[in-house]
Amino acid sequence: MSKGKWRLSNLYLIAVFVILYAPIFYLMFYSFNSGGAMRNFEGFTLEYYGEVFQDTRLLIIVLNTFVIALLSAAISTIIGVMGAIAIHYIRSNRPKGTLLTLNNVLIVSPDVIIGASFLILFTIAGIQLGFVSVLLSHIAFSIPIVVIMVLPKLQEMGGSLLDAARDLGASSWQVLTKVILPYIKPGIFAGFFMALTYSLDDFAVTFFVTGNGFSTLSVEIYSRARQGVSLSINALSTLIFLFTVLLVIGYYFINRRNNRPAGKGVRA
Amino acid sequence: MEARARNLYLVPYVLWIVLFVIAPILLIAYYSFFNVEGQFTFENYQKFFTPVYLRMTLSSFWYAFLITLFSLLVAYPTAYLLTKTKHKALWLLLIILPSWINLLLKAYAFIGLFGTYGFVNTVLEVTGIGTKQILFTDFSFVFVSVYIFIPFMILPVYNALEKMNPTLIDAARDLGASPWMTFRRVVFPLTIDGVKAGCMAVFIPALSLFMITRLIAGNRVITLGTAIEQHFLVTQDWGMGATIAVFLIIAMAILMLLTGNRKRGLIDIVKR
Amino acid sequence: MSQLVRMFLLVFLAAFGLMYVTSQLNSSAGYSGGNTLTVYNWGDYIDPELIAQFEEETGIKVIYQTFDSNEAMMTKIKQGGTTFDVAIPSEYAISKMKEDNLLLELDHSKLPNLEHIDSRFMHLSFDPENAYSVPYFWGTVGIVFNPNLVGDLTFDSWDDLWDESLRNNVFLLDGAREVIGMGLNSLGYSLNDTNEEHLQEALAKLSKLTPNVKAIVGDEIKMLMANEEAAAGLVWSGDASEIMDENEDLDYIVPEEGSNLWFDNMVIPKTARNLEGAHQFINFMLDPEVAAQNTEYVGYSTPNKDALTLLPEDISGDERFYPDEELTERLEVYDNLGPRMLSHYNELFLEFKMHRK
């Protein structure tokens, strides 16, 4: 490639990244504004960061959010992987297609509908709204994305590898743990990662199914928005954002060192 | 694999499908036959075919189309250039990362950036172009929507590009094809599955966008999603909301059929 | 494989570790004790210091949960599954909740402070005997405007919003009753009108407003008006007072044709567990000193006549938020029009939103 082209293409990528991160830096910038609002930067202050650490309720909510995200991502990954393996081994096309279509329904349904129908469901089932109902809902809407992440890896694997393993006398448990799971590992990681994203991002579903004092960060932000978002929320988002950036970069380089070829595990 | 083991794996998954997919769909279909006063009726379906809702459907599809088109136009070169970088997996992750920040907060940031006295207008003013109304226009709506959906378009296209055999490009170039020819005849056709998957992943959620329609478009754009949200949360006319949802689910099924055989579709998001 | 197992173990360990920390934080903050009271209110609609004071006086721990619309709140209470001891819905929601049997009757003998409420705000149509509700705050709907941006235009009538000089310079709040009500009021009809001809007339009039409307927005209207994104806006008086706190240039009026008078009220929903505590809480909030402090914090109009005397003159004497009897006469409370009419109002509003410039 010629030099001019290289510059142009880099410029394009830089522009994309700048736009993607512009609103986030905007939020971060104003978290230091002593003026108290997301406009007219008056002076530098760390006041809102102090507020975050003094607000026990907010801290509890942040922890709740992470607990729900981690647990729901892990459990939905386990169920999703089992589902993907099962779907992969269904031979006839009809039930397979049906299962896949049903699988995709939740991904494309509007959140409000998912939330409302889950609320009715929990009411019928007599489940108290709170931690359990939120966890169950997050698991429920994360499973399909895991299946979608894992299936292509299974298809890629092909049958000969398994036949070989079985010819060598491996039991089906051994086939699973020694052949299949290691092979689809990148898909599993990607699924876990996406499930985490969905859970952290969700507002509408949680809003419907939460109760009894239990809350997650996005729900809290929405109810606080009535008075205009306080800058302590900006400060909190800045902290969480920096934390995840560090986590992602750290994870990437650790993974790269342990794992060749590079970065397979983090492909989402 | 033995059938017994397979069925064992199937149990929790199918249980999930029955409880959290089939049951909700049935509930929605059931609710769509009741009016606000709780009587059984086909009224909601009649209402859907009145000019108000038909126009809303039409404009939803139009905006979803625009959003998908611009997402593709921005995402394709981005994905292509990403495959050429060092640490490409890391860059890809960094593309996804912004979607972890709360959407409402980002929307507020955009209001600040696009406002009459916002950053963008200050830049326009300084460069001599002059202040423009950006917020509450079709432009800002499409822009922010594309912003939200771009990772979901980049991922499948990126994966399709990665899967492509680079020697094919060399071969095409050796045979004297211009870069444009190579792209049109070789690269694009080979990545068409990724493009299709990306369009699916953007188009359907774009139909049911809400909140952005109010925050960024100032309710100048009404999508089916906005109407559903209104009916469920404001009017409490769950029957009408459910009816629109039924049509949305039908639209989704048709689109999935149209984009080729069922094994593809969304699965291509991560196919490499 | 071992890497997978390790990762999942780590995730579960981290999750349970965090859960442990959360429970520690919860118990140190006293949220898991026996004597608790769950208050379900709008976000930031009470002075947090008062909650602390109540907790200290009574030994009851308050769990404060928030909602962002009456409808969301009603859905939650209707479905059960949660224990809310006190909720603060708006008046039209109260008549609806009454119909659906979602409210418990108040025991007035446990609410001696009820005597401090101005008699104008008692025995209103949505709850004639105040058997279920006690007023918390009240207000009006009107026009907030920026004198620096409107030129010579003065505001005293709804029709002023239709003025050509306001092209693309007006925000409306996103509420069907408010916007259609404005259309009806401006034509001299009641904002509870159900006559189809009148409604169509109002819609036709509103469609002429379309070129002036910059956007129809929700709570952001406060931030947008304070940022001078538009010259005028249709808002609730409570929002107006917050906007004027942010930006002192702005002003608020209630148009002479009349407008809406709204109430937020304290009720005990049927999900309540701690009835004794709920009554204590309501009575506490009715105390003049408490109500006065809360009014200064929230900035809405208080119905508590004895609290009003404790407030500084620049609040209690402000005619924009405490209008005189003559204007109050022309204000109307929203009637419960029934689900079918309400749904019709919403459809008309939807049609109005779909008008393109």
Image: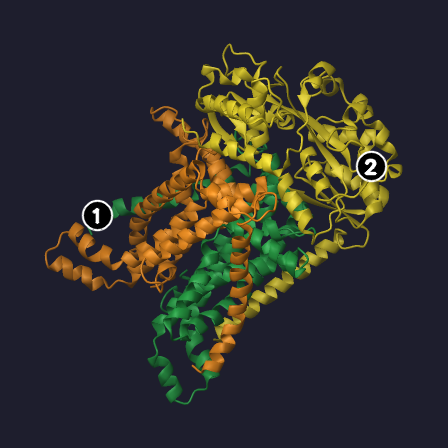
Does residue A110 lie above or below C2 as drawn?
Answer: above
Residue B15: x %, y % from top left: 54, 68
Mark 1 and mark 2 in contact? Answer it, CB < 8 Å.
no
Measured as percent of width and height from the top left, residue C79 is found at: 67, 51
Q: How many marks?
A: 2
Instruction: Tell me, for residue A3, which label it has, or none.
Output: 1
Q: Nearer the viewer, mark 1 or mark 2?
A: 2
Colouring rule applied to residues: by chain
Measuring 62% from the left and 43% from the top, which residue is drawn there? C72
Location of residue B87 with respect to B245 vertically, above or below: below
Q: Which chain shows up in orange?
A: B
Chain with green colouring? A
Q: Is residue C69 above or below residue C249?
A: below
| Residue to which mark 2 is pinned | C284
Determine crowd level at label 2: few under 14, some 14-19, many 20+ residues with C-alpha closer than 10 A: many
Identity of the residue drawn at 44% across and 49% down: B247
Q: Colour of chain C?
A: yellow
Disc 1 is placed on an element classified as helix
Chain label for disc 2: C
- Residue A60 is labelled as none
Q: Amino acid at mark 1?
A: Lys
Q: Describe the element under mark 2 as helix, strand or loop.
A: helix
Kind of residue at badge 2: Phe
On the image, which quarter does residue C142 sit in?
A: top right
Q: Residues within 10 Å of mark 1 (few under 14, many from 20)?
A: few
- Please give the chain letter of the residue carrying mark 1: A
